[in-house]
Amino acid sequence: MNKNECKKYLKRAVRALINKNKSITVSNLEMEMQEVINSESKIYIAYSKMALHTLLRSATSITPNELATEIDTISRIYNINDILAKLKYL
């Protein structure tokens, strides 16, 4: 994780603590950052699974560049809730 990603997760965690009316302590911040990171990773995994599923049905060979391009395409077409719903049936 680079410094910019760390700042992004930190800001999201602090906003979540404020929205939940929790005090900003080290333990609360740690817990909230873990939740933010877990939810982000679930989203990244969902996009990757959808891209791989699409490429397996249509491509003859799969390369990292093709996967990255497919993820970009999928993220423009579907929102994350649609992708999570579709993955239940794959």
Image: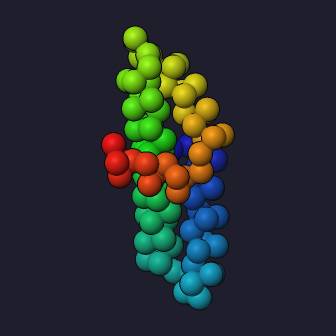
Residue 68 in the image, given as x and y percentages of width and height? 54, 27
| Residue 37 in view | no
Query: How many numbered marks does the figure carry?
Result: 0
**Which residue is nearer to you in this view: 61 or 14?**
61
Residue at the image point whose x is 64% and y is 73% from the top = 15
The residue lying at 64 percent from left, 47 percent from top is: 4
**Residue 75 seen from this side:** yes
Residue 85 position within the rendered picture, expressed as x and y whole percent measured from the top left: 44, 54
Relative height, residue 12 to residue 25 (above, below): above
Left or right of residue 60: residue 3: right
Q: Against 89, is 50 above or below?
A: above
**Is residue 53 shown left or right of residue 17?**
left
Give the answer, above or below, for where 14 lies relative to 2.
Answer: below
- Residue at 48% x, 71% y is 32
Q: Residue 42 location, x and y as percent?
A: 43, 52
Where residue 37 appears, x then y in whole percent?
47, 57
Residue at position x 61%, y 65% in the image: 12
Q: Is residue 3 left or right of residue 83?
A: right
Quadrant for the C terminus in the image: top left
